């Protein structure tokens, strides 16, 4: 080849390289714009998720104010939509980067004009890191740092933020939410591994690539990691295989799951205030104190129920509160039917007139307030109910086996056919409670004074040595059939106490 021919070839090669460099610049500019957008979204998401508290998944009207744009969205809605946006941007970026890898694979590490490729391309650390993979790529000072930063912000950051979404989805024990975020996190891991593997395969010549079986190893590991995330999410929300110790314990200490109204008063305070008002309006119309008090109590109960029913709250039917920290939580009037409180700490929780029927309450309820609550067929087996306030509660067919009711207030409670096998009732109050059809034969620390203060029926079984009080009925009643006889006895008892 003559000198003129060699010069012509060099010019042609330089022209081709110039055209290729222009193409690389166009692709790099677009890819960098998407990359910077992804980084901004990841940073935005990390700040937003970090600001979410456990109680925000439960409290009525709780929303999160998104940083920068100052826009409020419901917490769960953000946890459904946010990861999808992150994964969409992450996937789009890596699909677009395939063009960049193919473009960077064409020219040699050193161009025809003698310049290194990383000096000639559009300046971007991702391109520099990719060029360093090529055979003959330049070894620059701190090149290792360039590769680490590129890997972290290009491949690792997306899955890390999605895993953070997944981790913070545990508090509500919502399997669908945790599975959704876990699935997206798993897909990002698999997609990132495939993208990195493709980058390596494109930029390395065939003879320098790893054996095919080694190329498949990262994919297998990423698939296992994705499956592990889904299984771990199941453990943290549902506790499968009896591994309850893995279940996430939501921090709901002093959480207000019901919107507390202005001027809120406890039931006792509201009753005292109501009596003053009712006395001026109605007392002169009543023949005696017993009739007046019964009418006042009935009117108060109706008014209180209407007020509690009007409180704003989320729907908690069937919700899992397992192992949650609910100490001193504010929860009056909630519909918690078929909810699960197994292992939860409800110390001094305020749960007046809540519907807890068919609920698992194998929990710590020490000094909790459950006045006038519906606890029909609730499971209290082994629960700590010491000093709990169950005044006026409905405990029809409730399971109270081996529970600790020491110091509990069961005055006026309805325990029709309740299972009290091996329960402890030391110093518990049963004043005017209904023990109709209840089995008290194995109850520990049950005194005759407690028996005398309550109402019973023919099928009620007493402990050895216990005597049936004369005011107990000898009849057998169906589920609500005894209430008239019970109410009559309470009225007579009140009249006798006034005398």
Image (cartoon, rainbow, N blue to C red):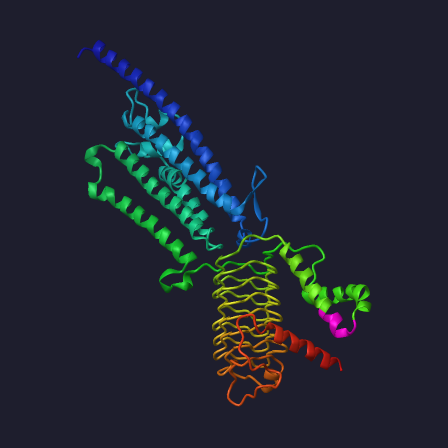
Q: Which residue is more in the foreground, 106 or 331?
A: 331
Q: In which quadrant of the rendered image does the N terminus lie?
A: top left
> Can residue 16 be seen by looking at this rendering?
yes
Work out whether residue 211 can be spotted: no
Quadrant of the image occupied by residue 253: bottom right
Position of 369 with respect to 241 (left or right) is: right
Q: Is residue 56 above or below residue 244?
A: above
Please tell me which residue lies in front, 370 or 171.
370
Give the vertical position of 291 relative to 442 (above or below): above
Q: Residue at x 34, y 40 (%)?
A: 191
Q: Residue at x 53, y 81 (%)?
A: 458
Q: Is residue 377 above or below residue 203?
A: below
> Quarter of the image holding residue 268?
bottom right
**Measuring 50% from the left and 44% from the top, which residue is drawn there?**
77
Q: Residue 329's spot in the image, x, y percent? A: 59, 61
Residue at image coords 51%, 56%:
317
Q: Which residues are magenta?
A: 287-294
Q: Position of residue 467 (x, y in %)?
A: 56, 88
**Does the magenta stretch mainly form a helix, a strand or a loop?**
helix
Q: Residue 56's x, y, as percent?
A: 55, 51
Tell me where residue 178 appears, x and y as whole percent: 43, 50
The residue nearer to you, when weighing 438 against 349, is 438
**Horizontally, is 470 left or right of 166 in the view?**
right
Q: In the figure, 355 relative to 119: above or below?
A: below
């Amino acid at each position: 080849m003559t000198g003129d021919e060699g010069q012509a070839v060099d010019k042609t090669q330089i022209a081709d390289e110039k055209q290729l460099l222009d193409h690389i610049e166009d692709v790099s500019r677009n890819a960098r714009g998407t990359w910077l957008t992804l980084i901004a979204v990841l940073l935005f998401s990390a700040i937003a998720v970090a600001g979410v508290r456990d109680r925000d998944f439960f409290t009525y009207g709780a929303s999160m104010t998104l940083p920068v744009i100052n826009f409020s969205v419901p917490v769960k809605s953000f946890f459904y939509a946010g990861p999808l946006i992150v994964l969409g941007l992450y996937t789009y970026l890596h699909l677009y980067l395939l063009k960049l890898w193919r473009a960077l694979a064409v020219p040699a590490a050193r161009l025809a004009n003698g310049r290194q490729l990383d000096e000639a391309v559009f300046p971007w650390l991702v391109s520099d890191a990719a060029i360093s993979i090529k055979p003959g790529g330049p070894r620059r000072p701190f090149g290792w740092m360039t590769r680490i930063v590129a890997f972290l912000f290009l491949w690792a950051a997306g899955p890390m933020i999605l895993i953070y979404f997944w981790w913070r989805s545990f508090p509500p024990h919502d399997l669908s939410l945790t599975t959704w975020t876990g699935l997206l996190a798993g897909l990002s891991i698999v997609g990132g591994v495939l993208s990195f593997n493709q980058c390596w395969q494109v930029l390395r010549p065939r003879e320098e690539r790893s054996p095919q079986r080694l190329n498949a190893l990262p994919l297998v590991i990423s698939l296992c990691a994705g499956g592990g995330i889904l299984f771990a999410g199941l453990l943290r929300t549902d506790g499968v295989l009896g591994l309850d110790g893995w279940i996430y314990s939501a921090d709901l200490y002093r959480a207000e799951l019901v919107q507390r109204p202005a001027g809120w008063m406890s039931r006792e305070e509201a009753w005292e205030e109501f009596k003053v008002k009712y006395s001026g309006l109605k007392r002169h119309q009543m023949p005696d104190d017993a009739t007046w008090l019964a009418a006042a109590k009935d009117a108060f109960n109706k008014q209180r129920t209407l007020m509690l029913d009007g409180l704003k709250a989320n729907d908690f039917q069937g919700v899992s509160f397992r192992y949650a920290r609910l100490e001193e939580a504010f929860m009056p009037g909630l519909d918690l039917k078929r909810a699960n409180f197994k292992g939860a700490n409800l110390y001094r929780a305020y749960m007046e007139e809540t519907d807890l029927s068919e609920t698992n309450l194998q929990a710590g309820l020490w000094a909790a307030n459950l006045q006038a609550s519906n606890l029909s067929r609730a499971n209290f087996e082994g629960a700590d109910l010491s000093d709990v306030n169950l005044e006026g509660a409905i405990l029809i067919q409730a399971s109270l086996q081996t529970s600790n009711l020491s110091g509990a207030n069961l005055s006026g409670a309805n325990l029709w056919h309740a299972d009290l096998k091996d329960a402890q009732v030391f110093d518990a109050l049963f004043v005017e409670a209904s023990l109709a059809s209840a089995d008290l034969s194995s109850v520990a620390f049950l005194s005759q004074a407690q028996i005398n203060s309550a109402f019973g029926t023919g099928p009620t079984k007493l402990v050895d040595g216990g005597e049936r009080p004369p005011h107990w009925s000898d009849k057998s009643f169906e589920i609500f059939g005894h209430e008239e006889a019970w109410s009559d006895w309470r009225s007579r008892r009140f009249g006798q106490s006034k005398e």
